[in-house]
Image (tube, rainbow, N blue to C red):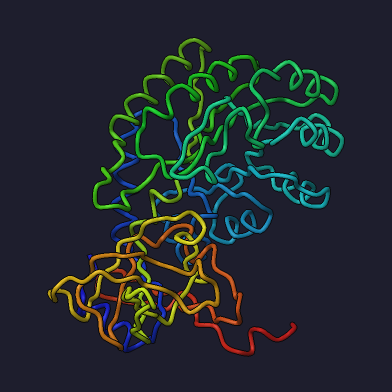
Amino acid sequence: MISNAQFKALAKKYGTPLYVYDVSVMERQFKALKVAISYEPKRILFAIKANSNLYILKLLRDLGVGFDAGSPTELFLAKKAGALANEISVTGRNFSRQELEYIIKHKTYFHADSLSQLEQVGKLAKGAEVGVRINPASGAGHHAKVVTAGMHNTFGIYYKDVNKIKEIAKKYGLKIIGVHQHIGSGILGVDSFFAPTETTIKIAQEFENLRYINIGGGLGIPYKPQDKSVDVKKYGIWISKKMKELSFVLGKDILLLLEPGRYLTGQAGNLLMEVTSIKKTPAGELVAGTNSGMTHLIRPAMYGAYHKVDNISNPNGRKQKVTIVGNICESSDVFAKDRQISFISEGDLLVIRDAGAHSFAMSSRYNGRLLPAEILIQGKKDKLIRRRDKFEDFLPR
């Protein structure tokens, strides 16, 4: 764990706001997941949308991780990180013809998200090997906005449309070699995976050329004090049992693919910021303003997400109820509402924890705000892995 003294030294060296990532946490999470799932053959693919920094991708690649790409750009990054075609899964929505041509050319594990997309692939690459994303009709997630399966959800092909998949495949000579699901994100209760995965495994047996099943991602991390860590051991035992049964029934080893994102990098990330003002609202509520904002970490504004906030300048001070806000001209730019935090003064350094996934990756330059620098901590060494924005970055290129 990065100490308060290290954070202070990094803030002095690089300035704030600043993203800081701990390599040891990523290594710990990968090892835990790999050990928990005894089934072989398997391949763990990192969901690039969680954190797209190329240095982090290369680090994960060195650990033996492949990649899940949701766009041509993410596919490009996966290749730049050193991944081979059979170490990359591509699953996305509403690709243009040009994007599909780019994806097909790279011969990755590609999954059609809709019947119409499968038809488009057939027209572009008759006889190709392809996977399909199934909507198993039930999903889960830490917020309604991240649930990606269910009767009213727009992701994937409804599992009862399996005959339509076969018709299109036959029409264009496509070989369905894989079945994919992704039911949602930030899931802490592993039981939520069981029913939809059972459905996906059942559907997968409909395809005679089946080589793999991709069960997607979704494993969460404990953001709130009362949250319990996801039981990856229970998850691993269950999916290993199901895959062994499937391989036995089909008389061949079926490759298991899974796509964790948040689980691998979420707890590794921290966002450092400085308190720039202290004020009270007309109602008497204490507010601490900072030099960061929702453009750097949008999860609290977008999902009402909880992130632990610590005052590392006064870690043992008396607690006070305070609202931590950002520097964007929007009422929703609130990091923490009425939170008990050690007494805060102007100039104090705050750290927002568990900001290694869907954090910088969802950042923007809205309101003319510069993107922060990113730092990687490996052992006692720190490395700049993305420079801080400059005013000139706003100029036309």
Q: Residue at x 56, y 32 (%)?
A: 181
Query: Residue 270: x, y in percent?
Result: 35, 67
Instruction: Choose top left, top right, bottom left or bottom right for residue 12.
Output: bottom left
Taking the image as drawn, is residue 157 in sight?
Answer: yes
Query: Residue 272: x, y in percent?
Result: 35, 75
Residue 282 relative to residue 36: left or right? right
- Front residue of 377/307: it is 307
- Front residue of 123/229: it is 229
Is 317 situated above or below 245? below
Q: Residue at x 20, y 79 (%)?
A: 5
Query: Residue 378: x, y in percent?
Result: 31, 69
Instruction: Choose top left, top right, bottom left or bottom right for residue 60.
Output: bottom left
Query: Residue 256: x, y in percent?
Result: 48, 31
Taking the image as drawn, is residue 57 in sight?
Answer: no
Q: Residue at x 47, y 17 (%)?
A: 247
- Front residue of 299/393: it is 299
Quadrant of the frame with the N terminus: bottom left
Is 117 situated above or below 306? above
Q: Residue at x 48, y 19 (%)?
A: 198
Quadrant of the frame with the C terminus: bottom right
Instruction: Choose top left, top right, bottom left or bottom right for residue 7.
Output: bottom left
